Amino acid sequence: MPPAALSIHLAIGQVYAWSVFKDPLGATVLKGNSFAGTLSGLPFTLGIVMLGVSAALFGTKVDHKGPRWAMLVATVFFAAGFLISAAGMALGQFWLVIVGYGFVGGIGLGIGYISPVSTLIKWFPDRPGMATGIAIMGFGGGALIASPWSSAMLTAFGGSGAGARSGGIADTFLVMGIAYAIFMSLGWLLIRVPADDWSPAGWDPASARERSLVSTANVSAANAIKTPQFWLLWVVLCFNVTAGIGILERAAPIYQDFFRGEAPAKTLVTIAAGFVAILSLANMLGRFVWSSLSDAIGRKNIYRIYLGVGAILYLVLELLGSANKAVFLVCALLILSFYGAGFATAPAYLRDLFGTFEVGAIHGRLLTAWSVAGALGPFIVDYLADRQTAAGLSGPALYTLSFRIMIGLLVIGFIANELIKPVHARFHQATDQLTSRETI
């Protein structure tokens, strides 16, 4: 089951490698356009928005139709997004890339993201944090595969560098669409749902329900969004993601601004690129390590670490500035590991609070927090850095205000996590209302 889930998440995690296409697009179909930088980011932005929207809209159907249906639909939409984009580049119509990769592919992103999660929780009821960490780790690591692969194809097909041509980008999109369709098909061919009465050998369900926040009841998606617990967790996830994605989106410029003058410009750019790669690795590993730890110490306690320690780390970054590279690197790596882990731990937290009945649908609705954070975090960091630059500031001073805002958001998230209590019995689903799920 983990390989089935990873085949989906390693594929859709390609979205984190979209920046590889920005310069080639600017040199070909968007050449001469003064807004090329902004326009080349639209497919990515729309894709993230559609991820949250489609996960929220189709989450209930994913739970009722089963993971095989969901993974097949995700495969079709995600691969079709690349094929439409390939046609757009071949015809010189960039709007088709926005529609294909952003809208169509974004639907595949959302359905694919939630499709294996609830299934893995059912296979690993004794370790739900580890189970979701396995799958969502793949999403964080997808860019580690897609980035060098995309760059190599763009170079081979003539889609980048001097004399870049749009046909080279079209060829790259075409190959990726076909390759991802084949790779993701492993997921929907392999996936299975356990029988209703299945449990791991030697595991006692009662032992997992000793913690106060682990529910023995089930809550429907329709009822879950009526509870304060859902919205408190929405705030927790939104602000945890905002704090992490603000650094992730601007990682290379942040490193260069903090340590400018300590190395030649060309060397600094290379080091900054390595910094981005290391952050991606921390993002990926944090999803598995920290979410697995949550099985031992509890979901509420692990979010206390993500939010409380995260706020302290941002304070250290602000106070030390560029004084110590080692401290800067450790703080940044931990913040990004908490960012990834917040995603991976959320489904297990939902399972503790609302049961497994429609956890996929509830997870889909929760991911709207990601859509908001995906716009909020980069806006805070980029906008304030631009304002500080216009005011004549430079270096670490560009980020002082944005880091303080991140600290405030993390503190608010910490408080929201503290307010989460067990779900009231009036929201529980009656036993005779729990319909069986598809068993493939």
Image (spheres, rainbow, N blue to C red):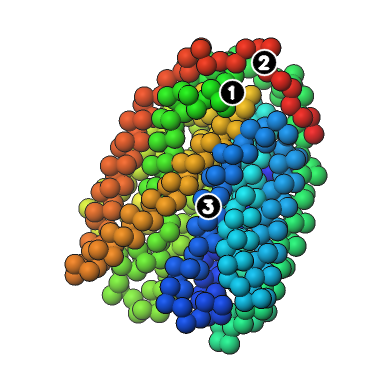
Q: Is 100 above or below relative to 117?
A: below
Mark 2 or 1, nearer chain start: 1
Q: Position of residue 291 (x, y in %)?
A: 52, 37
Labels 1 and 3: the sequence-earlier one: 3
Q: Which residue is mark 2?
A: 433
CB atoms of marks 2 and 1 within 8 Å: yes
* Type of amino acid under label 3: Ile
Which residue is situated farthest in the bottom direction here?
163
The three-letter code of the residue at mark 2 reads: Gln
Say the numbered circle drawn on residue 220.
1
Q: Is residue 38 above or below residue 360?
A: below
104 horizontally vs 323: left or right: right
Question: Is there any visible trace of residue 399 in the rendered image?
Answer: yes
Dividing the picture into quadrants, the one containing residue 203 is top right
Residue at horizontal 77 percent and vertical 24 percent from the top: 195
Q: Position of residue 8 (x, y in %)?
A: 68, 49
Left or right of 128, for residue 404: left
Q: Which residue is mark 3?
A: 48
| Within-10-Å neighbours for mark 1: few <14, some 14–19, many 20+ | many
Foreground pick, 113 / 337: 113
Q: Nearer the viewer, residue 234 or 204?
A: 234
Q: Position of residue 201 (x, y in %)?
A: 73, 22
Q: Who's the residue at 28% across and 47% down the image?
A: 405
If you read the primary sequence from the N terminus, does the residue marked by circle 2 or circle 3 appear first?
3
Q: CA distance from mark 1 to mark 3?
A: 26 Å
